[in-house]
Amino acid sequence: MTKKITEYGADADEDLPEEVLAPIENGATPLAAVRIWKGMSVDQLARLSSLSAAIITGAEGARHLSPEDQVKLAFVLGVGADLFYE
């Protein structure tokens, strides 16, 4: 059974599993942790979000995302956009 921890997500009420939280606590960006947990490649996420792979790769390296891009990624990944807020 996967333990859920309420800490990230829309208004901090979205439960994310330890498989997402542990990588974040170890330095991964929330975007990378969620993308990997969802089993998506950067290219798949780029196609589904209509963003370039370069934007996603940059964001996974801690580059700033615009609010519009945060919403697009959150929608595709099924998480609250505030997960990606700095």
Image (spheres, rainbow, N blue to C red):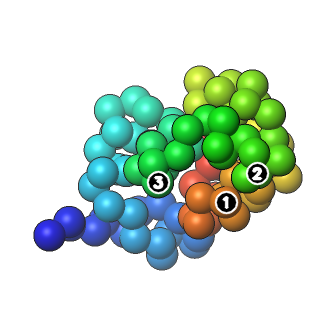
Name the spot of residue 36 as percent of width and height, x first: 45, 43
- Figure check: 31 above or below 59: below
Is 81 or 46 nearer to us in this picture? Answer: 46
Residue 30 visible within the image: no
- Figure check: 53 above or below 86: above
Q: Residue furthest left?
A: 1
Q: Residues within 10 Å of mark 2 (few under 14, many from 20)?
A: many
Location of residue 55 by image quarter:
top right
Name the spot of residue 27 as percent of width and height, x first: 40, 30
Q: Does the CB distance between marks 1 and 2 fall below 8 Å?
A: yes
Name the spot of residue 42 as percent of width and height, x first: 61, 35
As shown in the figure, which amino acid type bears the numbered disc 2? Ser
Disc with the residue nearer the chain's start (2 vs 3): 3
According to the image, label 3 marks what residue? Answer: 38
According to the image, label 2 marks what residue? Answer: 49
Distance from label 3 to label 1 (Cα)?
Answer: 10 Å
Name the spot of residue 3 as percent of width and height, x first: 20, 67
Location of residue 31 by image quarter:
top right
Disc with the residue nearer the chain's start (1 vs 2): 2
According to the image, label 1 marks what residue? Answer: 76
At x 29%, y 44%, the residue is 22
Q: Quadrant of the N terminus?
A: bottom left
